[in-house]
Image: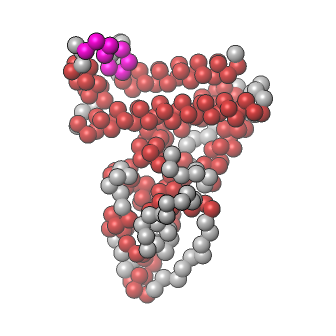
Amino acid sequence: MAGKRDSHPRSVWLTSKPARKRRESESAAGAGNLDREKIIATAVRLLDAKGEAQFSMRLLAAELNVTPMSLYWYVSNKDDLLELALDSVIGEIRLPKINVRSDWRKDLRALAGAWRHTLVAHPWAIRCYGEYLNIGPQSMGFTQRSQEVMARSSLSKEDQLVALSAVFQYVYGFASTESRWLEYGRKTGSTVDEFVAEVAASVSGIPGAQGGLLERRSTQTMKELRDRDFDRALDWLIAGMLA
């Protein structure tokens, strides 16, 4: 069975296939202890540890102590599994409870911050976001809660959707950059602060290289600076919606 999808776009959520009956040889190989939830949870753990580039169905099978073909009784291919894993990760996002008396802007900030932290915790998910439709149950739950939050604003229905798009495109871009810097640090065996200091020192003599993340503007750590920048820009974005 192929490990990748065909070239045309598709989604695991748009395909319904009946479960297949395992052969005795596969049950004896440990497949009888498998279920889709266990496969997805193990895939997420491996993706966090190894990254998408090094992840494979063979590696997953070895981790589960089963034959690679056993996995295909539960998922059709690697793409389907990645899509399932992505939706599972979205389920980790802490959704604010809806309270008509609370400030919708506070809830929107909470949603944006929770999504940012979840993406950064799973760098492979950032890269997968652009590959799949993201219409699984967890994704749709996140979308619905976001729309419920925006429904309490003074914006028109049409502008609510545009505003959400703007906010979450900002979050996605910020988390992508943040994750990349964290990854640079991990690859060099340094903390982000150490890596940024090294880069800043190496480009200190280049005109126009001052400012941004490469310049320590205070005694704050890079995490504190990132949190500050994220919150301030998000506040500006929300203020711009209502201007």
Q: How is the image coloured?
A: secondary structure
Question: Measured from the top left, where is residue 234 in percent x and y?
Answer: 56, 24
Segment colored magenta: 206-214
The residue depicted at 46 percent of the width and 86 percent of the height is 23
The residue depicted at 41 percent of the width and 43 percent of the height is 123
Q: Can residue 234 be seen in this view?
A: yes
User: Left or right: where does residue 185 sit relative to residue 90?
Assistant: left
Extreme-front residue of the structure: 7
Q: How many labels does the image show?
A: 0
Q: Of 48 and 163, which appears nearest the observer?
A: 163
Image height of 82 relative to 171, above or below: below
Which secondary structure dominates the residues rendered in magenta? Answer: loop
The residue depicted at 48 percent of the width and 37 percent of the height is 117
The residue depicted at 54 percent of the width and 52 percent of the height is 132
Question: Measured from the top left, where is residue 172 in percent x and y?
Answer: 51, 36
Q: Of 1 and 90, which appears nearest the observer?
A: 1
